[in-house]
Amino acid sequence: MYITIYSLSMRNSDPDSKNGIQSIERAAAILRMFTTAEPRMTMTEISSRMGLSKATGYRYVSALRSAGLLRHDESRGDYSLGTLILNFASAALAGLPLISTAEPVMERLVRITGETAVLSIWDGGSPVVVRVNDNSERAVTVRVRTGYRLGPNAAQSQIYLEHGFTIRTNDGNTHALDSVPDNPGTVYVHTNPSLGTRTVAAPVYLGSRLEAVLGLIGTTSTIPDSLDSDIAKALVAGADAVSSGLPDQESSDKQG
């Protein structure tokens, strides 16, 4: 798979060359466009959204098809994620017992609050969403895409920053706190006035280490701007439940 994607633009034998890295990043960006809300796309849609010519888009898509990462439906004339992705998903879940522990907690939070539950983990230079539960009975809910990288202003990102993490954005900028608190907060609330959304986030620990961040996102009219609201308290209790359900640090180290 790596060689197929890599060969799209490599012109020398250096695997760290700029062209090779750009090729992999573009291939990954194509795969990220496919979501549960939009599982199929045409070649024209893929090329247009990526800002590529049809010829260049076709080369990327062909390579991804050869690697089993995309499949082509000839009767419909569009593309969807390939079956190899299912193997990756199973392997990723197997490596993250956090998700199986968090899922019932997230389901319960959605049921009692009516908001969307979001779980993020640290992935390289930023938090990335690994699980979303938006199965609320409300007519209007806020949706978040799995795989979405959170920006430095997100409520969940603030938890990571308070624990000493440095967030790197796509434009190459870094974001970190000048002074990391000795006792990071247990809950953080962030409001996005332009979108009318509000998020409350709480840390999940493996032993003393920050393992993930659990959040609830809704509208400014459904989530109070208070650290002591019932929703914030329910979230903190949920994050604590996930933390207590994870393997203890000693067992985790032995398995590693």
Image (cartoon, grey):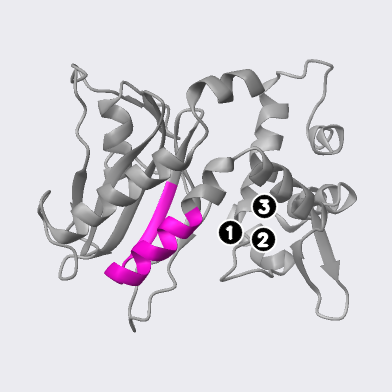
The tag on residue 112 is: none
Is residue 203 found left or right of 3 in the rendered image?
Answer: left
> The N terminus is located in which quarter?
top right
Name the one closer to the observer, 132 or 173.
132
> Given the image, on which type of amino acid does mark 3 rest?
Leu
> Measured from the top left, where is residue 30 in percent x and y?
66, 52
Is residue 144 found left or right of 42 in the rendered image?
Answer: left
Is residue 234 found left or right of 87 in the rendered image?
Answer: left
> Magenta span covers which residues?
103-119
Name the one closer to the observer, 115 or 43.
115
What is the spatial separation of the Cα atoms under label 1 and label 3, in whole angstroms? Answer: 12 Å
Residue density around tag 3, few if under 14, some if 14–19, many if 20 or more, within 10 Å = some
> The C terminus is located in which quarter?
top right
- Residue for badge 3: 31
> Measured from the top left, where is residue 42 in percent x and y?
72, 69
- Residue for badge 2: 46
- Determine whether 30 is above or below 250 in the image: below
Name the one closer to the observer, 10 or 251.
251
C-beta proximity under 8 Å, tags 1 and 3:
no
Q: Is residue 43 visible?
A: yes
Magenta-drawn stretch contains 31: no
Q: Earlier in the sequence, mark 1 or mark 3?
A: 3
